[in-house]
Amino acid sequence: MVSGCASRLPRTVSLEKSVENLAVKRLDDFVHESCVEAMDSDVRVSWQAYGRKVFYTATLQAASPSFIRFAAVDPLNRPLYLLVSTGKDFTFADNIHGEGFTGTGEAEYFKRFLPQGILADELFLWLSGRVKEEGLRLLSVSKAEEGPLFWYEVRYDDSLKHLLGLDLKHLRRHLVVDKANRVVLDVQYAGYNATPRDCDWPGTMKVDGEAMEASLSLEVKKVYSYARPDEQIFHLQLPAHYTVHEMR
């Protein structure tokens, strides 16, 4: 209770059939929008837990379907920590202590970077405020008791359900709920930026929930490009003098 944030399920009201049909079409339009496949930016990340808040300035490069390069930097723009992942494998460099960690996307060590409900090969979708189309089953539609959001209960499997809060343009909130009806993950999006494609990119992303040891916020400070980079940047060769740990 003193670390993560205990999020609550949204209060909703049912819809008339005609409005429900429009809401279902809204979800279908959202899922099938044409979106950028990459993003290169400066970001500001913060963690808050136990009454303490920590900030990092960082660079973030991401590309679909699952490529990530994240570097926390010092005031001289030198990387303190560097994480690269293809979704299938990862490399983490601790430049302060001269250590490196490598392994697959299924390694328990790598899963420490990801809250319950987020898979390594879906991280780009979460960062971009999108949802996976494959396997999506719509169970119900409702409207927020207060505010403009339509709420969609969807599933991809029988273990977790997802609640999607959409307004007329964007995904504003994405909850992951377990079988005990606990909100294990609560992601809120705001400040969307226009891109060259149909969909926009979220300017801020706030992550809470019972699966989180701390509240996490990511703010995009400057976007350099939405062009797809050379995939080689998502592979990292650790310096020869680093102590390298193969994680499982």
Image (tube, rainbow, N blue to C red):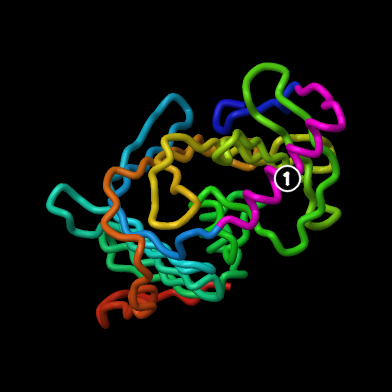
- Number of residues whose C-alpha sits closer than 10 Å to that of mark 1, classed few (under 14), some (14–19) or many (20 or more): few
Residue type, mark 1 in image: Lys
Residue occupying image coordinates x 84% and y 25%: 14
Image location (x, y in percent) of residue 132: 66, 58
Quadrant of the image occupied by residue 87:
bottom right
Q: Is residue 24 one of those drawn in magenta?
A: yes
Image location (x, y in percent) of residue 77: 17, 55
Image location (x, y in percent) of residue 19: 78, 31
Q: Secondary structure at mark 1?
A: helix
Residue occupying image coordinates x 57% and y 52%: 130
Foreground residue among 88 and 140: 140
Residue 157 vertical position relative to residue 142 in the rendered view, above or below: below
Residue 89 vertical position relative to residue 40 in the rendered view, above or below: below
Residue lying farthest left? 76
Quadrant of the image occupied by residue 153:
top right
Quadrant of the image occupied by residue 156:
bottom right
What's the magenta region?
12-33
Residue lying farthest bottom? 240
Foreground residue among 55 and 67: 67
Residue corresponding to mark 1: 25
